[in-house]
Image (tube, grey):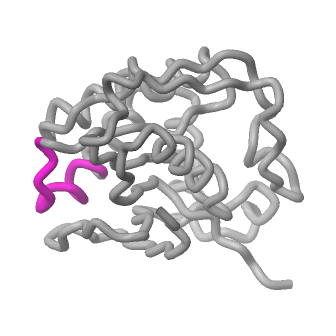
Amino acid sequence: MNLNKIKVSRSYVGNKIKTSDMTICLNTYTPNRYFGHASFEAQMTHDYILNFKSGRSAAQKRAAREVCLALSMTKMENVVFACVPASCNRTNTLRYRKFSQMVCERTGATNAYGHIIINGKRSKLHRSKAHMVCDAANEEIHLDPNMFNASAKVLLFDDIVSSGKSMREFAKLVEETGAKVIGGIALGHTKHYKH
């Protein structure tokens, strides 16, 4: 799975998410360094995504609604919904446990949340001016082979896609189990400004 193509779409409803090398991004995310020049709408989206990342209930409910709406025309009964792991188990639990449960209850997808185990910790991304995906040398991710097997079709979710590297690396890990990654969906795609 390549996942190199990124489509930013605020209204993806009515279009089927195809089993392709594509990540659907529901919003445009403005990084902190450009926040002062952002429109009011961009600032509100920024705050919403950061509230989601912090595990705020209202933001998780809104995100679940947005994702479910984007997936509403896609048959999800035989799809495994897997969130790209956060920097540590605590953050992953705060961010994804309730959210993935809401999405799977509404779409009929299989929830992979409890089948992805994170040991260790890596540096948080999206926090530096340079925004580099850091070395995950202190982090191990274990995937349950009963969930991620040759018959599994997996849809990946990430909160923010900047370069797409985190999602591609997780897709590679998932596909090493024999499962097939059918695409990705994200709350936001980082807007890169030219100077």
Camera-side residue of 37 and 172? 172
Residue 98 position by quadrant: top left
Camera-side residue of 30 and 37? 30
Q: Left or right? Give the position of 186 relative to 35.
A: left
In the displayed structure, would residue 29 be above or below residue 127?
A: below
In the displayed structure, would residue 71 be above or below residue 59?
A: below
Q: Residue at x 78, y 35 (%)?
A: 136
- Which quadrant would the C terminus be assigned to in this image? bottom right
Q: Residue furthest bottom?
A: 195
Q: Left or right? Give the position of 46 relative to 68.
A: right
Q: Residue at x 53, y 66 (%)?
A: 28
Q: Residue at x 18, y 69 (%)?
A: 16
Instruction: Find the magenta span and give its range.
Output: 67-77
Camera-side residue of 175 and 4? 175
In the displayed structure, would residue 178 be above or below residue 165?
A: above
Q: Position of residue 161 (x, y in %)?
A: 58, 58
Residue 88 position by quadrant: top right
Q: Left or right? Give the position of 134 relative to 35.
A: right
In the displayed structure, would residue 134 be above or below residue 94?
A: below
Q: Residue at x 83, y 54 (%)?
A: 132
Residue 33 position by quadrant: bottom right
- For the stretch drawn in magenta, the main secondary structure is loop
Camera-side residue of 46 and 2? 2
Q: Position of residue 137 (x, y in %)?
A: 83, 31
Q: Position of residue 36 (x, y in %)?
A: 76, 63
Q: Is 31 a magenta residue? A: no
